[in-house]
Image (spheres, rainbow, N blue to C red):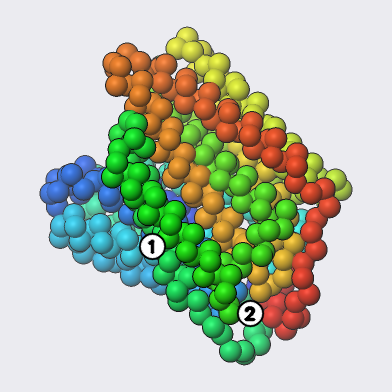
Amino acid sequence: MGSTMTSSKRNIIVALMTATFLTAIDTTVISTAMPAIARDLGGSELISWIFSIYLLTTAVTTPIYGKLADLFGRKRIFIFGASVFLIGSFLCGLAHSMVQLMMFRAIQGLGAGAVQPITLTIIGDVFTQQERARLMGLFGAMWGVAGIVGPLVGGFFVDYIAWQWIFYINIPVGLVSILLLYRFLQENLILRQVHIDYVGVGLFTLGIGLFLYTLLMGGKRSAFVLEPLTLLLLGASVLIFWIFLRVEKRAVEPMMPIQLFRRPMIAASQVLSLLQGAVLIGSSAYLPIWIQDVQGYSATTAGLAVLPMSIGWPLAAFIGGRMMMKSGYKLVTVLGMGTLVIATFFLSLLTTSSPLWAVPVVVFILGVGFGFSVTSLTIAVQSSVGWQQRGIVTGTLQFMRTMGQTVGVALLGAVLNWYLAHGDDQLSAGLMRVFLSMMGTALIGFLLSLLIPREQEQPEPELAAEKSAGGK
């Protein structure tokens, strides 16, 4: 990143990358270890909840931590969240039943919700715009790498050590991350009276938690939206969220400043992040199934076939960062969303006789699309607000992407389940319809990207003393 990068900044990067990788890999490392865990602990009927509870608690707490980082500083909240994650990891290793493991995975998720949004917020505070483009591409690609490395690491610990070590290994690595950030990230904060929006936090957690729970459970069945209980739960979650929005309008220090999301750039970025999340989960969840169950290749081959996304993402982020300096964020965002349309179009053309090399090529193009669009949106949104709002807009951006993944896997799963209900021989037809649905989602995102403002919105005046001293 050039000779101007100080040793302090390098250590901050190491700390953030380590923490990001730990929380990212924890969503996948457990997959290959799960059969051994179920044999040891029993309660195999709860296996799906071991995965779902981590996703649910992470998603719900992400914007909350973003707001807390604006109130109390990035360092304190990051260290708190990372510490909760490590406590949860330690407890997971001690679990003696699947119910205990499920509870401790929830604690892990409560901590993990702080890592991703505050990592991106710190990058926005400390690094220049050009440095941010490179770093965010690198951090985004780490999630793809974690998806490949995680199952391999989980299998290694199960085969040669013990499944408990997929959790214990987090502790020494995570402590290094915490110590580095504590030592090298400097913040000068003005002491002021803080009003914590407890009611808003409670309503948001209840409403969104109920919504995600309903989708996670309903997505395992076809036509779940037609079930009365599901409709009742979805209606209750919408009502609670409506009450939350009403409360936020009157709060002294709202958890989610509603007026902020009336700005065209920020509002559009939230919707685009939702759509990006749906396309991302569709490719990562269903392409391996296509390669293995339709084309008949091994799991290792499927893992290698989706690896090019981790190459295309940081490469496009690096190029897109340079383009933004000259042409602005809108052009890069439109280019990225258009690339996603092209990639998903090629996906929809796949057949059972398509050559294996076609999938890695398409996956690389997908990575390029995400590298351009995700990076440009994140940088544009962070640059459009001051220090005291950067945490919440970054947190909600990540939250909407997670929401997109949750909604996407539920709806795309329902599409696939509809075909499977008509016979196992319908798998290829169902997956092709899933890919077509992904293309429609990407196309909506592309059209929306054409409507975002051309000029970058300027941040509101901020207190200079509240900026990160590690900064630009």
Identify the residue at horizontal 64%, vertical 31% (top origin): 443
Q: 294 and 198: which one is in front?
A: 198
Q: How far across and how far down the image is residue 166, in percent?
A: 31, 55
Hey, what amino acid is under mark 1?
Answer: Leu
Q: How far across and how far down the image is residue 466, in percent?
A: 69, 80
Q: Secondary structure at mark 1?
A: helix
Q: CA distance from mark 2 to mark 1?
A: 35 Å
| Up/down of 2 relative to 196, above or below | above
Left or right of 105 in this view: 64: right
Identify the residue at horizontal 54%, vertical 51% (top origin): 400
Left or right of 323 in this view: 52: left
Q: Quadrant of residue 203?
A: bottom left
Q: Quadrant of residue 159?
A: top left
Which label was assigned to residue 441? none
Q: Nearer the viewer, mark 2 or mark 1?
A: 1
Q: 58 and 326: which one is in front?
A: 58
The residue labelled by disc 1 is 206
Image quarter hosting the C terminus:
bottom right
Identify the residue at horizontal 77%, vertical 70% (top origin): 460
Q: Secondary structure at mark 2?
A: loop
Ranked by sequence position, the earlier of labels 2 and 1 is: 2
Are there few (<14), some (14-19), or many (20+) residues within 10 Å of tag 2? some
The residue labelled by disc 2 is 186
Residue 103 can be seen in this image: yes
Residue 212 can be seen in this image: no
Q: Quadrant of residue 125?
A: bottom right
Q: 409 and 358: which one is in front?
A: 409
Left or right of 59 in this view: 181: right
Name the residue at the top extreme.
Answer: 353
Are there few (<14), some (14-19), or many (20+) residues within 10 Å of tag 1? some
